[in-house]
Image (tube, rainbow, N blue to C red):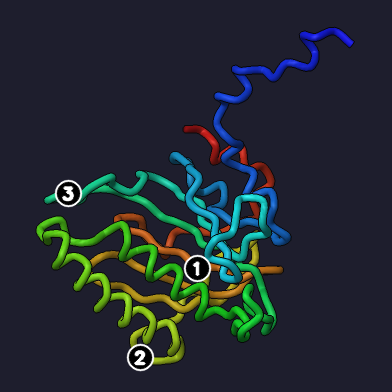
Amino acid sequence: MDATQTTADPAAARRPADPLAAYRAADFPWYGLDEGWTGRRWLGQVGTGQNPRATPSDIPDYGTLGHGDEPARGPEPRDTRRFATVVTVARREVRRSADNTGTLEATSASSAAWLAGAGLLAVTWPGTLDRTLRQQWLDQQSALAWDLADDLDGPAWSSLTLPVNGLPQPFRYRESEYGWVLAGEAPGVLIGAYGRSVSAYGIGFTTVADLEAYNGR
């Protein structure tokens, strides 16, 4: 064999990892906004509820796909970003935790609502707060978001019907000074979404046939 064939390609070693690898590892379909959205699309984050130290090769439990302006890298005194982020959550039954010391609850629409609410808080925190106050604010608002997600039939939520793959589907919806959050079900998954300066009443969801449409960075 030619020695050149056994030498590692240094250029290949410098290439970034495939940003779609974690998405492609999913055992559930991804959802994004349908063709009614003509703006920019971008990849968000993929996570697992089973193992906080999971690697990109592990099967994810949820992930996000973004539409519009990406999250700011730092605080902005006047946030003018316009965006909508879709959270896809796998349907999971009650299962053992990664360390086998307990169980993880089955996912539900509340799971999607919590992830969407936490996602909104993470990208819209007030820019006037310093680091210490920001953490206090985030802890307080996250606890509130958790309580709200656990009570989707409560007065804080209203009903909203939106198309999913062209068919009407009921969602639970709420607004705050930071933006809006919604949660519901779709074929094979649970859907959450959050946004700002994009009307939730005018969006629709669809199965993502080609993730490359979000890989434009």
Q: Which mark is residue 171?
A: none
Residue nearest the viewer, comparing 161 with 33: 33
Q: What type is the residue that disc 1 sits on?
A: Gly
Viewer-closest of 25 and 29: 25
Q: Is residue 110 above or below residue 86?
A: below
Which residue lies at the image location 35% right of the left edge and 44% below the top edge? 69
Check the picture and name the quadrant holding the N terminus. Answer: top right
Q: Position of residue 56 (x, y in %)?
A: 61, 50
Q: CA distance from mark 3 to mark 1?
A: 25 Å
Q: Amino acid at mark 2?
A: Pro
The residue at 57%/59% (across/down) is 205
Answer with mark 3 or mark 2, whichever residue precedes in sequence: 3
Report crowding for label 3: few under 14, some 14 to 19, many 20 or more residues within 10 A (C-alpha): some
Q: Which residue is mark 3?
A: 76
Give the answer, above or below, for where 111 lies relative to 22.
below
User: What is the x, y in percent for residue 8?
Assistant: 69, 19
- Local SS, label 2: loop
Q: Who comes first in sequence, dot 1 or dot 2?
A: 2
Q: Which is closer to the viewer, label 3 or label 2?
A: 3
Residue drawn at the location 28% of the way across and 46% of the way down = 72
User: How far is disc 3 from disc 2 in space, using C-alphas?
Assistant: 32 Å
**SS of the residue at dot 1?**
strand
Residue 63 located left or right of residue 132: right
Please state the horizontal and vertical placement of residue 111, each as a whole percent of the image: 52, 77
Query: Which residue matches tag 1?
Result: 192
The answer to whether 70 appears left or right of 3 in the picture is left
Judged from the image, the secondary structure of the residue bearing numbered disc 3 is loop
Other residues around mark 2 within 10 Å, as few (<14) / some (14–19) / many (≥20): few
Q: Nearer the viewer, residue 113 or 56?
A: 56
Disc 2: which residue? 155
